[in-house]
Image (tube, rainbow, N blue to C red):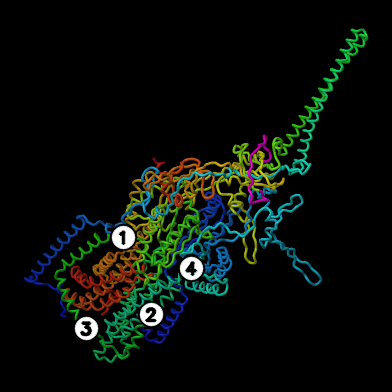
Amino acid sequence: MSDKHADSAAVPLPSPQRIWARVWSIGQFLLSLGLTLAFLAYLLFVPDPLKPGDSEQAAPARPEIVSLVGPGLIRVQPGSPLDKKIQVVPVRKGTISDPVMMVTGRVIASLRPGHGKKEDYWQFDSPDLLAAHTDWEKAQADIVFSETQLEQVKQLAATRLKAQREVVQRMEKLVAAGTDTVKDLTAERANLIQVEITGRQEVHQAETAVRVAKRDEAAQARKLQQAGLDPELLKIATSDMDIVVADVPEGRINQVRVGQSCLATFFGLPRERFPGKVRSISPVLSIERRSLRVLFVIDDPDDKLRPGMFAEIGLGTDSREALLIPADAILHLGRSDYVLVAQGDNTWAIREVQVGEPHLNEIEILSGLSHEEQVIGKGAILFKPVVVRSLRSSEGR
Amino acid sequence: MIAYLIEASMRLRWVVLLLTAAVCGLGLYSFQQQPIDAYPDISAQMVQVITVYPGRAPEEVERQVTIPIEIAMRTVPRVETVRSRTIFGLSVVQLTFEEGTESYWARQRVQENLASVQLPEGAEAEMGPLATAYGEVYRYELVSDGTHDLMELRTLNDWVVIPRLLRAPGVAEVSNFGGLEKQYAITFRPADLDRFGLSLNDVVEAVKTNNASAGGSILQRGSMSFVIRGSGAIQTLRQIEDTYVKSVGGSPIYLRDVASVEVDHLVPFGIFSKDRVDESVEGIVLMRKGENPSRVLAEVAKAVTELNQSELPEGVQVVPFYDRQHLVDATLHTVAHSVLLGITLVVLVLLLFLGRPAMAALVALTIPFSLLFALILMYVSGIPIGLLSVGAIDFGIIVDGAVIMAEHIARRLGEARERGEPHSVPRVVLAAAQEIERPVFFSVLMIMVAYLPLLSLSSIEGLLFRPMALTMVFALLGSLLFALFVVPVLATLVFYRGYEEWENPLLALMRPAYGYLLRFLIQFRWLVLGAVVCALATILVKLVPRLGVEFLPYMDEGVIWVRANFPEGTALQQSSEYGRRIREIALEFPDVKFITVQTGRNDSGTDPFPPSRLEIMIGPRPKEQWTEFSTKHELVAALGQRLREEFPTTRFNFTQPIIDSVTEDTNGTSANLAVEFSGAASDVLLELANQTVELLRTVPGSQDVNIEQEGPQPQLVITPDRMRCARHDVRIEDVTNLINIALGGEAIGTLFEGERRFDIAVKVDRRIVNSPLAVGRLPVHSASGMPIPLNQVARIELVDGQTIIARENARRRITVRCDIVGRDQGGFVKEAQTRFDETIRPRMPPGYRVAWLGMFENLDRARQHFLYLIPLTAVIIFSLLLLTFRSFSSAVLVVAGIPFACIGALIALYLRDMHINVSTGVGFCALFGIAIMDGVLMVRGINVLREAGFELRAAILLGAQQRLRPILMTAIVAIFGLLPASLATGLGSDVQRPLATVIVWGLFSAMLLTLFVLPVLYYLINPKITLSELGGDPLATH
């Protein structure tokens, strides 16, 4: 290659080729400048039909399978997997005899059948009770005795009075007949008064004895009650019944009433159930236990029970009708319980309910539903987020 | 200095060769010692404090446990964040330390502060294992042939399998999931206790006082001594039954008279299911932080083999279903495949250009040497072998220095041979090496400098890509040493007979055509410039906005991890039942191999999840066996669609196990985007979160928008009424004992069966406690022993309480999480923030804060960092060029290679539908250093001719043609070196692929534009030529 320094060498007048080259260079420069600027302007100012990000659209929105279609209304897409998964059940009206409460107790008294000449006799679970019962029976016997005594004393007094009156009448006749003296008559009249006084005194004493016996009997009856037994109950009990006592907590007293049915299970006879009824409710609350003593009379036709046997007693087993739904149907939110009630066309209404006790896998509905309404059972929990949203939007409104 | 060293190396050739062999040997040794892992451990330095406080509601646990621990941890140094999660009976406080904090130091500080915390009785706090979420390396199922039930399996897992696995070196912890934990239960009915006038305390006291052993020192008899030992500990069920309780009327009452004693189980926290097995037992092995996964897994496998062969009973086997070794092996396979293919292609290109196998081999030897050299330094600096270290090395760049050196030596030898000069080969080689050492040094230095700014990356991106940058720098250093000192030595041995240069005939044909084309382009130089400007503008205005932005590319871990949140309050068994349906659905897909479902939480407390939460692992079959889908994304999309149709009210999140756990631990959430509210009142936070959920659902691209923390769930709250307790003479302690022990099943004693120990618990018969009313009927005993129903001394209410309470830095927080699909993260977040600022922010009460977090936070941080990094890299390179050329216009010309390279890289990203992320950012930084080399060669070549007196146009044409071969060779070698990595689709190629794509296609466009446009630019700019003060151009290769 020749050693030329074209740029630095001094050049005489430019040749036509050089002029043409320069013109071409300037023309090319202007042309490319114009084209470039035009292109840049086009890039910057002509709107892009395809905005950045448009080519990467998010996945098209799919139809919602479960949606809120109104205040408290949920719709499930028919035929969707969710729709197939939920179990729709009717609100069932059932008869339940589950106890309203369970208490523990024991047999405190049992009337044992007598044999032959022997009469039926009471057996108790504790010496204290036996002693109290004995004292009470003695007191009753005392009343009978005292009353008998009173009758006889009255009879005696009346007889004495009558006899003395007759004596006075006879004396009067004799005095009138002059066979006897007035002094004797006066003495007999005085005796009559004495007899009257004595008679009244004796009657009074006998009456007092009766009253005392009765008071004593009442006291013994109360003692018996304090010991846990209602004397009235003892009077009506038969040998195929036993008396069971239990303590009902102070806070549940309002759930107990006389005549209420109950069902007892005894520790020693776990497979048997013994029906009975509430017969008596103690008038006094136990200070230490803060409970009320309740007495039941339990049927024991086969005489299997013995005093002292320990029992679990279900109170309030009278059959009653109740509305029942599966426990799965209940959704608890905040402080309330809700269910989803069918409205037709795969739509469900959110409804607040009051729930009671569970019964096996079902729950009693106290209010909020009516018989034969349909609710979502198994699978209701899956609706909880939608229910929450619905309740939130209702609160917002 | 370098010239002197080269001379010394030529004199001591055998020493050089010995040292080379020593380096290779050391490198091999390092390779054997080095940890090998798929991905580096990107989890932050963390210490967990886990406190079990059984039976307490979250609010209770928060107040009594979590907050005191948080307060105590405030003074721990170097803590970045303190997060906590509190659920029923469990508190997990997590401290995240600053990057670089040493693990044991951090744990020591936490332990010191933990010692000062006053916790309530019954609460036991301990530190979590020295492991991170990344450390879950192995999962197994304990399988029975039907002869062992769940309780037996659980017992075997607790007492045989886990203790054996814990002995494997490197294992930090083994967690159990599922099964039934055996306990001895004393189950009573209140009526039975009442029968004998007993209280719960009587029973508890009886068990406690009748279960103790004693030591009575020594009894001496003559020359013998006897150790006195009292053996009163309970060892059998019969002994529990025979425990004396009290005497009634002179007759002893035993426990069997008032309660049933039986082998029972604790209320399970979690249920594990796999495929069609509804309940099974799982073990999760956690590797200690910093251990070598391959080595640990080998030990674990050995332990499992031992267990299966001899330690487990007949019919029971440990069957692994997740083994990180598969991911490591697959990734290594991908890396090895890419690397070997890359090396092969490099050698092929060298052969094609250099023509001589000996020359190609000489150059190719750089590759193993650099690799082994890098391994030594990696071993010293603790960088594991993996995808993002060795896998990211471009061997085409590595050989650049050796190519320049070898080619120059070959040319000089060829010239000497042509001239017939009787010079010895060593002398010619030495002269050639000394001539070229500076250009070699500067060219490699330029590339190394481009990688250095990457060392400033921090956090997750730093953990991922700093090893790559360091590895590359180490390899380049090795290649420089090889090129400068070993290539000349080897050249004297390989070319001892001299060298005849060879040119590829194709290249000889191309050269004139290239020259002709170049003339044409120079003639239309302004149009060419305009076209380039338009092309650049088009890319910047039209293409770049269309490129999505994300933090990290999708890193395939092989398996799919799904989180499913059923409505709060869903019972464990119910959730597990729904899990069964999920398993059925997944197994309908023929490409799915296995599925496991974890319902609830594990027993170690490291995952505080409620019973309504499921964590599902889906293992696809090997890719070659797939029949239905072609990519994992398609499979995930299809699974997601099916599951969401099946359970439309359930929150699903599809992710992967490692990235999910790591980012959750590091950022507090694994979502693409998380909007976090913090403040005092939970209800206000919940309201803000609900509004944000509604808002995000309307932003296009959102998916699975929901509140991260589970909402309130029903709680049966028993609150002792102090007035009524006083009236009934009942102590609060008796009420709490009833709740803890009788209802909560708190253990009151221990029974030893040989080495095994099981709890003894007293609990009320669950059949009678089946409703809140039934709970109210339970008797609590007064001081005088009278039974008082609980509802007479306490309020019993069914209310909603917190399922989980999340806190961060001493404030309650709630997070709205959102995944982003079909759209770039940056654009989505911007739109969401705009709408949020317009609608919700103005209504936020004072004292409440909002933060935009998640993977997006990392993206923001990385974006900020790269906004400095990329210009910095460009400035450093420009400065170096200024230093070497001493000409601003020359430096500008060379730097034009950067936009040239960007054109190809951006077009490639767009055509391959890849997003801009940290991987591509790193690729761009690396690309800049490599891309300018072509420009350096071209500009230098033209400058040399102009210095020799050629006029501008002639110097350009001749210089460009002369530089055609070296430019093509260096560029193609560099391109082919990473081409396999840019096209790889195997497991583990996801992080590498964007980086390799940017480099490969950027180099391609840089090469083309350097060949065809840079000469035109040179003509237009016409830089002034200056010579260097050292009397020679450091980059001159003539």
Measured in 3D between alpha carbons, the distance from the residue under mark 4 to the one under mark 3, in whole angstroms, is 57 Å
What is the three-letter code of the residue carrying label 1? Gly
The residue to which callout 3 is attached is: B505
Of residues B144 and A117, the one drawn nearer to the viewer in this rendering: A117
Q: Nearer the viewer, mark 4 or mark 3?
A: 4
Q: Position of residue B663 (x, y in %)?
A: 43, 60
* CB-based contact (under 8 Å), mark 2 and mark 4: no
Q: Position of residue B678 (x, y in %)?
A: 44, 49
Measured in 3D between alpha carbons, the distance from the residue under mark 1 to the one under mark 3, in whole angstroms, is 44 Å
Q: Nearer the viewer, mark 2 or mark 1?
A: 1
Measured in 3D between alpha carbons, the distance from the residue under mark 1 to the one under mark 4, in whole angstroms, is 35 Å
Q: Position of residue A308 (x, y in %)?
A: 71, 46
Mark 4: which secondary structure?
strand
The residue to which callout 1 is attached is: B548
Residue drawn at 76 percent across, 34 percent down? A220
Of residues B40 and B988, the one drawn nearer to the viewer in this rendering: B988
Of residues B879 and B933, the one drawn nearer to the viewer in this rendering: B933
| Circle 1 chain | B
- Which label belongs to residue A46? none
| Mark 1 neighbour density, 10 Å: few (under 14) some (14–19) many (20 or more) | many
